Amino acid sequence: MEKLNGLSHLYMMVFLHNFSSCMVAPAITDVTMGALCPGKDECSIAIYLTGFQQAMSGLGTLMMMPLLGSFSDKYGRKAILTLPMTLTIIPLGILAYSQTRRFFYLYYVFNVLFSMVCEGSVPCLSLAYVADNVTEEKRASAFGVISGIASAAFVCGTLSARFLSTPLAFQLSTLVAVIGAVYMRIFLRESLIDHNLCTPFISHVNPAVIAKIDCEKPKSDTQLFKALRSLNDLTSFFNSSLTITQAAIIAFFSNLADAGLNGSLMYYLKAQFHFNKNQFADLMVISGIAGSVSQLILMPILAPTLGETRLLSIGLFFHCIHMFIYSIAWSFWVSYAAAMFAILFFFAQPCIRSIVSKEVGPHEQGKAQGCISGICSVARIVSPLAFTPLTALFLSERAPLNFPGLSIMCIGFASMVSFVQSMMVRTVPPILS
């Protein structure tokens, strides 16, 4: 019962965090272009700034995710979750105050800096928290549920943005982010109290328990430097088994495609069909509802029957298809039809996480999820370098041929690589210690 209560508070925290961030997602394209290229439907500098932010975020999280995951194994999930839950409030507060060019640039700087630490850390640590409290045979379904909660928050946030003005959306988003951080600190219980925790940075763990734990502190700057060698951790982790290596390849190419699509799609739709905040919100609501149905209803039914590997291949196959449909969209309604494929392709990410989770022991869940987030960060570094110039070129007047969706089609080919690799995955019995 205590574990169920802990998971319910975690689900509420995830909902509030995603609700806050998704509320401003439909408006950020209009805010960016309004600050940089007012009155225009095509803006190369906005595309390049978005790509630069993705690359810097990926570079930062490449180093930070394995480190934060390992720290959460050592100091506790709740203590480390406090950092991203708090830092994400600041950039939102800046645009809640003003959306002029000066404040946009201030927001942009803080958002780039904080995303290098916070990007993906809440989902990563939340999955490790779930793995602490759920048995292996139920883990794929549990990971699907937490992704479904995030999708439900996505729907609620984008629906709110659909009916709120842009300034009010940012103000409400900031308030919800503050509520989420406070809720987490008050209600969420530490899931690793029975493990060998060191004294947490911020903790409610019983001091009598901590007093019995012998934790070595770094004795020199050299030892601290060694603790920060995240790249070595990544390399050793991904070489630990064939299944983990295959999962890392799948995670890289599927996130390469996701990052490319996220950085290109809105600018493509705005240039091609003159989408605005409300139409972006409609598109996101369709995708979010489909994803919620997929992860909260279908995945708990299909995962025990089909297994993670088959469900992973199904998700990645439709991931490719929906990108190809976007790339050849001949009317605005085709984009809405493509968004409905989310009911099938949202299987992929929870399945990857579940496969990796079962390959490591109970004391390495944070490190495992952090390393997978690290490889996803590498994809976010590479994606802007590969796809941002292509998107900017084919949406401009200098395009060598009239095919605005060419970059989206190339992104779909990257997703196809992950689908082909998923067909080769053969899971083995998990390591128990």
Image (cartoon, rainbow, N blue to C red):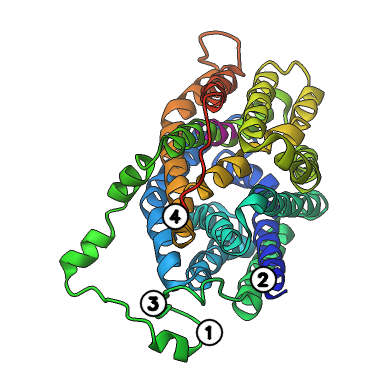
- Whether pointer 4 and pointer 3 mark residues with C-beta atoms closer than 8 Å, the reply is no
Residue corresponding to mark 1: 204
Magenta highlight on residue 214: no
Q: CA distance from mark 4 to mark 3?
A: 34 Å
> Which of the two marks, 2 or 4, is nearer to us in this view?
2
Residue located beneath label 2 in the image? 3
| Secondary element type, mark 2 | helix
Q: Quadrant of the N terminus?
A: bottom right
Tell me what residue is drawn at x 50 percent, y 32 percent. 250
Residue 134 seen anywhere in this rendered image of the structure = yes
Q: Choose mark 4 or mark 3, whichever is in front.
A: 3
Which residues, given as a range, are shown in magenta? 256-261
Q: Which residue matches tag 4?
A: 109
Q: Earlier in the sequence, mark 2 or mark 3?
A: 2
Q: Of callouts 2 and 4, which one flags the residue occurring earlier in the amino acid sequence?
A: 2
Q: Which residue is mark 3?
A: 198
Q: Which mark is residue 433?
A: none
Residue at (47, 35) in percent of width and height? 252
Closer mark to the observer between disc 1 and disc 3: 3
Instruction: Name the amino acid, label 1.
Output: His
Gap between marks 2 and 3, in whole Å?
22 Å
Residue 97: quadrant of the picture: bottom right
- Whether tag 2 and tag 4 are in contact, CB under 8 A, the answer is no
Eye-nearest disc, 2 or 3: 2
Answer left or right for 132 relative to 212: right
Q: Examine the residues drawn in magenta and state their main secondary structure.
A: helix
Secondary structure of the residue carrying tag 1 is loop
